[in-house]
Image: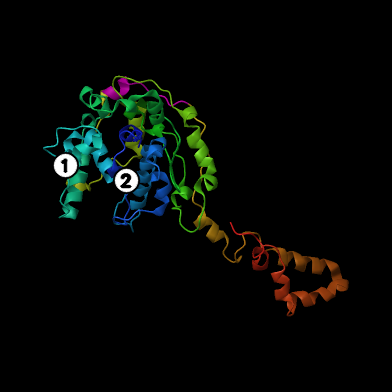
Amino acid sequence: MAGLYHLARLNDRWFRLDEALRFADKSGNCIHIRWLPYVARLEEMGTYSWGSAALAWLYRCMCRVANRHVVKLAGPLQLLQSWIFWRFPRFRPERYETFGWPLASRWAGYNPSGSEKGPRVQMWRLRIDRLQDREFIWMPYSSPDVLQVVHPEVLEPRHMALWRSVTSLIYFAVIEWHQIDRVLPQFGGVQPCLNPALNIDFLISKDGRGGDRWFPYHLQKWHLYWDDRAETVLRFDVVADPGPSHEFLEWWSQYGKRFLSPDMQLGDPRAVPIPVEASQRGPGRVPDMDRPEDVPDRRRVERRSRVGTRRSQRDWNWLEHAMDDHHDAGPAGCCRSSHLTGPHLYPEIADQPGTLSDQQSLPHL
């Protein structure tokens, strides 16, 4: 989360050709034709927010790999690896002490072995479970040795404001939500109890396939959130010891999944006390935000509601109403029975609203 600090904003003076790897997928060395308009003029490449697009693509790839049917992870994995190593010193490989700009190039040559996948997963889960609260660095980029190599343009106020903006991240049809209010310690704040996360399951289910659509028009609402990103910058107190508050740790201890390893691999008790430093930080506070409405993925619910109703979502009770009208009409309305019981039934159904004959006249989206 909140990796815009790590990505910054690439411009035409220090945009490198290998930055195309930030948007890698599973197609090998192929690239989509949609990229051509954005690289046709090199002098305009600095006008795009490549960092936010790469972060949106990374978030989407991590969501996809959470599906049990997905076995390979795509996306800017070098950035994800760098994020882990900068914040978890115990996980860093040896002989990678020197670094420069960009920061992710520090571990560019690191390529772990792919053998013994099962034991490696168990080992890393156990190492994560045994981490102590002081073995995670919330703000690794604020150290003096890192600030000496950071490009000076990254620290300009117009870019620093973007790191703290709660807005949409856009990469063609990919829309992700930049919820830094859930990771305030990465920006020097105290993390209070979390507000409900924005539900964008419907947007996550879209990948741009199945039609030729102009994304800024079809997803105009989310492009407007990005245009107004300067109005959604969070302002909070920066403290000397950032981290989770006491209330957050109590909530996390009660509802969170604290351990990844099975009980047989854990030799320590699970009653880990909350550190005293958490009480000294205070409760923390997130300013009020105007967030968009949830867009849950309700396709499964809608499919179930359409069972027995063909392709229409309308209530198919017109036949019952017709029978009631026929019953209320009495003997004088007996002539209507031929429309309900004889061979005229199907032509009558075809003329009802919401059926196939009506849908065929609708324009295509």
Q: Secondary structure at mark 2?
A: helix
- Find residue 33 and report its image quarter: bottom left
Q: Which residue is mark 1?
A: 267
Looking at the rendered image, the quarter that the N terminus falls into is top left
The residue under the point 17% across, 50% down is 120
Q: Residue furthest right?
A: 332
By secondary structure, the bulk of the magenta-drawn segment is best described as: loop
Q: Is residue 305 magenta?
A: no
Q: Could you tell which of marks 2 and 1 lies nearer the N-terminus?
A: 2
Is residue 94 positioned above or below 63 on the image?
Answer: above
**Residue 288 x/y as whole percent:** 49, 27
Image disc number at residue 187: none
Q: Secondary structure at mark 1?
A: loop
Left or right position of 120 against 77: left
Residue 49 visible? no
Residues packed near mark 2 inside 10 Å, few (<14), some (14 to 19) or many (20 plus): few
Left or right position of 174 against 331: left
Under mark 2, the amino acid is Ala
Under mark 1, the amino acid is Gly
Please name whichever residue, 54 or 201, is drawn nearer the observer in this view of the structure.
54
Q: Are marks 2 and 1 in contact (CB under 8 Å)?
A: no
Q: Is residue 283 magenta?
A: yes
The residue under the point 77% across, 66% down is 324
Alpha carbon of mark 2 to alpha carbon of mark 1: how far?
45 Å
Q: Which residues are magenta?
A: 277-287
- Find residue 220 and report its image quarter: top right
**Residue 179 x/y as whole percent:** 41, 35
**Residue 132 x/y as whole percent:** 21, 33
Image disc number at residue 20: 2
Please name whichever residue, 162 or 262, is drawn nearer the observer in this view of the structure.
162
The residue under the point 64% across, 67% down is 356
